[in-house]
Amino acid sequence: MNNSKKILLAVSGGPDSMYMLNKYRNKAIEVAHVNYNYRGNDSIKDEALVRNFCNSRKIPFHVLVLNHEKELSLSKIKNKQYRARQIRYDFFFNIMKENNLETLLVAHNKDDFLETAIMQYKKSPNDRLFYGIKKKTMINNFLIERPLLKYWKNDILEKCNKKNIPYRVDQSNFEPVYQRNRIRIVLKNKSLLEKENLIKSYENINLQRKSLNKEVEFSFSLWKDENFSIKVFKEFDDKLKNHLVYQWIIEQNIYINLSKGKIINIVNFIQSKKGNNNNYKLSDKYYILKKNKEIKIERY
């Protein structure tokens, strides 16, 4: 992380993000908070907590307050979790663009890594290059860093309590409504040793696929340098193409529920384009409708 430039912190008011905010409070930072108003008065208290912390330390504070009508106007995605993610990251990236910020800090922890890895493996047991959450990712040319991935949730709670860092707990995180919540409830009953062993199992898979991961990253950078040319894509090794399309979707900040079948359909569509005209690329403005396989190709 470049300490000479301002960074943006995504802060919800929970223990993880408040610990992160306290940790970086004396650095050159700005703070962003999204109030979805999902939890009534609790949402208002979350916002007030973050706002008061920032105001007392003269930290620039940005807030997006939503109601259901405004939320739907900002995103037509039907899945509530995907919609919320798109809204908050669009909000973060707009702040970064307007304020010339290059790095976003997000307070994902070790439990988040494990929950994500389990969800990913259940969905794609053999198809992913990486299970869990990476320490650094690039989206829309913005760097996202996750400085708390080495800490378990309980470690962060202990640190907050020891340092008297204020935070609020979202009890809805333990309601068995979403798959992540159900996994979280199961993991809560496991010992620390069991969870450490689970993480090691996913880290071993990631290690085994490290070489292929690097090959995909290198090929993706070449493809990006060529403005995502269709011709260049066709020249890549077939074993890389599914991964390249997946990486393209992530980097373009597109929120869809991807499956292996959808990725294969996308690759087949691209390769069905006749000719090798360098003047055709994948569009970075609008891509896939969730319920069909439409891909937009643009001349540049």
Image (tube, rainbow, N blue to C red):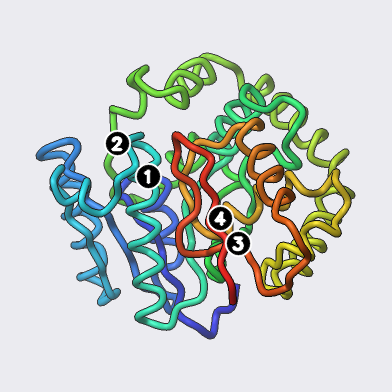
Q: Which mark is residue 114?
A: none
Q: Secondary structure at mark 2?
A: loop
Q: Nearer the viewer, residue 271 or 112?
A: 271
The Cα–Cα distance between marks 2 and 1, rounded to whole angstroms, is 7 Å
- Residue matched to label 3: 282
Q: Position of residue 70 (x, y in %)?
A: 16, 51
Residue type marked 1: Pro
- Mark nearest the camera among 1 and 3 is 3
Query: Closer to us: mark 3 or mark 2?
Result: 3
Residue 15, which numbered label?
1
Above or below — where is 232 with respect to 198?
A: below
Q: Earlier in the sequence, mark 2 or mark 1?
A: 1
Q: Residue at x 51, y 46 (%)?
A: 294
Number of the label disc, if any, that sits on residue 146: 4
Tell me whether the residue at label 2 lies in contact with that at label 1, contact meaning CB atoms closer than 8 angstroms. yes
How far apart in space, not on screen, are marks 4 and 1 (Cα)? 15 Å
Distance Cα–Cα, label 2 vs label 4: 20 Å
Vertical placement of 158 versus 34: above or below?
above
**Quarter of the rendering containing residue 267:** top right
In primary-sequence order, the first of circles 4 and 1 is 1
Query: Do residues under tags 4 and 1 come within 8 Å of each other at their CB atoms?
Result: no
Q: CA distance from mark 3 to mark 2?
A: 42 Å
Q: Amino acid at mark 3?
A: Leu
Label 3 sits on a secondary structure element that is strand
Give SS at disc 1: helix
Task: Please name which of the two marks, 2 or 4, marks the residue nearer to the observer.
Answer: 4
Residue 186 lies, in percent from the top left, at 51, 15
Determine the residue positioned at 58% across, 16% down: 190
Residue 171: % across, % down: 28, 28
Q: Secondary structure at mark 4?
A: loop
Residue 169 tag number = 2
